[in-house]
Image: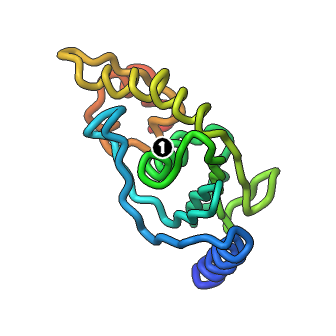
Amino acid sequence: MRMIACAETYVEYIHKRKEELNAKMLIEEKVYMDEISTKCFGTADTILIGEDRIAVIDLKSGKWGVDVERNKQLMIYGLGALARYGDENTTMELTIVQPRGWHKDGPIRTYEISATNLVDWGYNDLKQATDACDEENPRFVAGDHCKFCNAKADCDTYKTTLGEKYG
Protein backbone atom coordinates (compact mmCIF):
# COMPACT_ATOMS: atom_id res chain seq x y z
CA MET A 1 0.00 0.00 0.00
CA ARG A 2 1.33 3.40 -0.97
CA MET A 3 1.62 6.06 1.72
CA ILE A 4 -1.03 8.24 0.06
CA ALA A 5 -3.53 5.36 0.31
CA CYS A 6 -2.54 4.92 3.96
CA ALA A 7 -3.26 8.59 4.65
CA GLU A 8 -6.55 8.41 2.75
CA THR A 9 -7.73 5.48 4.90
CA TYR A 10 -6.88 7.48 8.02
CA VAL A 11 -8.62 10.66 6.85
CA GLU A 12 -11.74 8.76 5.80
CA TYR A 13 -11.92 7.09 9.21
CA ILE A 14 -11.51 10.27 11.26
CA HIS A 15 -14.14 12.09 9.20
CA LYS A 16 -16.56 9.16 9.60
CA ARG A 17 -16.04 9.09 13.40
CA LYS A 18 -16.32 12.89 13.60
CA GLU A 19 -19.75 12.70 11.98
CA GLU A 20 -20.87 9.73 14.09
CA LEU A 21 -19.87 11.49 17.33
CA ASN A 22 -20.94 14.96 16.17
CA ALA A 23 -17.52 15.90 17.51
CA LYS A 24 -15.11 18.78 17.53
CA MET A 25 -11.90 17.70 15.79
CA LEU A 26 -8.39 18.59 16.94
CA ILE A 27 -5.39 17.67 14.78
CA GLU A 28 -1.82 17.29 16.10
CA GLU A 29 -2.98 18.38 19.56
CA LYS A 30 -0.31 18.63 22.25
CA VAL A 31 -1.56 17.04 25.48
CA TYR A 32 -0.21 17.26 29.01
CA MET A 33 -0.89 15.40 32.22
CA ASP A 34 0.80 17.62 34.79
CA GLU A 35 -0.99 15.83 37.65
CA ILE A 36 1.04 12.73 36.75
CA SER A 37 4.30 14.43 35.75
CA THR A 38 5.22 17.77 34.24
CA LYS A 39 7.63 15.84 31.99
CA CYS A 40 4.92 13.60 30.54
CA PHE A 41 3.23 14.92 27.40
CA GLY A 42 2.57 13.97 23.82
CA THR A 43 1.07 15.04 20.53
CA ALA A 44 -2.07 13.19 19.53
CA ASP A 45 -2.65 12.82 15.79
CA THR A 46 -6.41 13.39 16.16
CA ILE A 47 -8.72 13.99 19.10
CA LEU A 48 -12.48 13.97 18.57
CA ILE A 49 -14.47 15.52 21.40
CA GLY A 50 -18.05 14.29 21.52
CA GLU A 51 -20.75 14.85 24.12
CA ASP A 52 -19.76 12.02 26.47
CA ARG A 53 -16.92 10.41 24.51
CA ILE A 54 -13.43 11.43 23.49
CA ALA A 55 -11.78 9.54 20.64
CA VAL A 56 -8.00 9.60 20.35
CA ILE A 57 -6.95 8.32 16.93
CA ASP A 58 -3.35 7.52 16.05
CA LEU A 59 -2.06 6.78 12.55
CA LYS A 60 0.63 4.11 12.34
CA SER A 61 2.22 3.85 8.90
CA GLY A 62 4.61 0.99 9.67
CA LYS A 63 4.12 -2.66 8.86
CA TRP A 64 4.84 -3.93 12.39
CA GLY A 65 1.35 -4.56 13.85
CA VAL A 66 0.70 -2.40 16.92
CA ASP A 67 -1.73 -3.59 19.60
CA VAL A 68 -4.35 -1.09 20.73
CA GLU A 69 -5.49 -2.73 23.97
CA ARG A 70 -3.85 -0.93 26.92
CA ASN A 71 -1.47 0.78 24.48
CA LYS A 72 0.59 3.07 26.71
CA GLN A 73 1.16 5.76 24.09
CA LEU A 74 -2.58 6.06 23.41
CA MET A 75 -3.41 5.91 27.11
CA ILE A 76 -1.02 8.80 27.75
CA TYR A 77 -2.65 10.81 24.95
CA GLY A 78 -6.03 9.81 26.37
CA LEU A 79 -5.10 11.05 29.85
CA GLY A 80 -4.02 14.39 28.44
CA ALA A 81 -7.21 14.74 26.39
CA LEU A 82 -9.35 13.69 29.35
CA ALA A 83 -7.62 16.17 31.68
CA ARG A 84 -8.39 19.04 29.33
CA TYR A 85 -11.68 18.12 27.64
CA GLY A 86 -13.46 15.44 29.67
CA ASP A 87 -14.79 14.50 33.08
CA GLU A 88 -15.45 11.38 35.16
CA ASN A 89 -18.39 10.41 32.91
CA THR A 90 -16.38 10.43 29.68
CA THR A 91 -15.75 7.23 27.76
CA MET A 92 -12.34 7.18 26.15
CA GLU A 93 -12.06 5.59 22.72
CA LEU A 94 -8.46 4.86 21.76
CA THR A 95 -7.93 3.87 18.12
CA ILE A 96 -5.00 2.82 15.97
CA VAL A 97 -5.38 3.16 12.21
CA GLN A 98 -2.64 1.06 10.59
CA PRO A 99 -3.50 0.31 6.96
CA ARG A 100 -0.04 -1.03 6.00
CA GLY A 101 0.51 -3.36 8.95
CA TRP A 102 -1.01 -6.79 9.36
CA HIS A 103 -2.88 -7.36 12.62
CA LYS A 104 -5.28 -10.16 13.55
CA ASP A 105 -7.89 -7.50 14.47
CA GLY A 106 -7.65 -5.66 11.15
CA PRO A 107 -6.22 -2.29 10.09
CA ILE A 108 -8.41 -0.18 12.43
CA ARG A 109 -8.51 -1.22 16.09
CA THR A 110 -10.25 0.47 19.00
CA TYR A 111 -9.98 0.05 22.75
CA GLU A 112 -12.50 1.68 25.07
CA ILE A 113 -11.77 2.59 28.66
CA SER A 114 -13.74 4.58 31.21
CA ALA A 115 -12.37 7.85 32.52
CA THR A 116 -12.13 6.31 36.00
CA ASN A 117 -10.09 3.32 34.82
CA LEU A 118 -7.82 5.50 32.70
CA VAL A 119 -7.15 7.87 35.60
CA ASP A 120 -6.53 4.90 37.92
CA TRP A 121 -3.93 3.59 35.44
CA GLY A 122 -2.39 7.05 35.27
CA TYR A 123 -1.92 7.36 39.01
CA ASN A 124 -1.15 3.70 39.81
CA ASP A 125 1.12 2.81 36.89
CA LEU A 126 2.21 5.83 34.86
CA LYS A 127 2.95 8.08 37.83
CA GLN A 128 4.99 5.35 39.49
CA ALA A 129 6.99 4.88 36.27
CA THR A 130 7.58 8.60 35.69
CA ASP A 131 8.60 9.09 39.34
CA ALA A 132 11.08 6.19 38.99
CA CYS A 133 12.70 7.98 36.03
CA ASP A 134 13.48 10.94 38.29
CA GLU A 135 15.28 8.87 40.94
CA GLU A 136 18.97 9.53 41.44
CA ASN A 137 19.85 6.06 40.16
CA PRO A 138 16.97 4.92 37.96
CA ARG A 139 16.57 1.21 37.29
CA PHE A 140 16.79 0.21 33.64
CA VAL A 141 14.55 -2.63 32.52
CA ALA A 142 15.23 -4.36 29.22
CA GLY A 143 12.40 -5.79 27.15
CA ASP A 144 10.85 -5.95 23.71
CA HIS A 145 10.30 -2.18 23.91
CA CYS A 146 14.07 -1.69 23.57
CA LYS A 147 13.96 -2.38 19.83
CA PHE A 148 12.45 1.09 19.35
CA CYS A 149 14.78 2.97 21.72
CA ASN A 150 17.17 5.55 20.29
CA ALA A 151 19.53 5.13 23.27
CA LYS A 152 20.04 1.37 23.02
CA ALA A 153 23.54 1.77 21.56
CA ASP A 154 24.61 3.51 24.78
CA CYS A 155 22.58 1.39 27.23
CA ASP A 156 24.55 -1.15 29.25
CA THR A 157 21.36 -2.95 30.32
CA TYR A 158 20.32 -3.40 26.71
CA LYS A 159 23.79 -4.52 25.62
CA THR A 160 24.11 -7.16 28.33
CA THR A 161 20.51 -8.39 28.20
CA LEU A 162 19.15 -8.09 24.67
CA GLY A 163 21.96 -6.85 22.42
CA GLU A 164 22.28 -10.10 20.50
CA LYS A 165 18.49 -10.54 20.12
CA TYR A 166 17.86 -7.12 18.54
CA GLY A 167 21.41 -6.04 17.63
Q: Nearer the viewer, residue 77 or 5?
A: 77
The residue that disc 1 covers is 79
Question: From the viewer's perspective, is residue 131 above or below residue 92?
Answer: above
Residue 112 x, y percent position in the rendering:
70, 45
Q: Which residue sits at x=59%, y=78%?
A: 7
Residue 58 x, y percent position in the rendering:
56, 61
Left or right: 166, with 128 as reference point:
right
Image quarter for residue 89? top right
Q: Nearer the viewer, residue 156 or 68?
A: 68
Give the position of the C terminus as an image quadrant.
top left
Number of numbered markers: 1
Question: From the viewer's perspective, is residue 149 above or below residue 97?
Answer: above
Question: From the viewer's perspective, is residue 26 above or below residue 81?
Answer: below
Could you tell me the amino acid type at mark 1? Leu
Q: Which residue sits at x=53%, y=39%?
A: 72
Give the position of the N terminus as an image quadrant.
bottom right
At numbered mark 1, what does the secondary structure look like: helix, strand or loop? helix
Image quarter for residue 5? bottom right
Q: Extreme left residue here? A: 136
Report the colour scheme: rainbow
Image quarter for residue 35? top left
Q: Which residue sits at x=57%, y=65%?
A: 48
Left or right: 24, with 93 as reference point:
left
Residue 68 x, y percent position in the rendering:
66, 47
Q: Is residue 125 visible?
A: yes
Q: Is residue 2 visible?
A: no
Q: Nearer the viewer, residue 39 or 115?
A: 115
Q: Which residue sits at x=43%, y=30%?
A: 163
Using a 10 Å C-alpha cutoff, classify the residue at mark 1 as few (fewer than 14 neighbours), some (14 to 19) or many (20 or more).
many
Question: From the viewer's perspective, is residue 133 above or below residue 12?
Answer: above
Residue 97 x, y percent position in the rendering:
65, 63
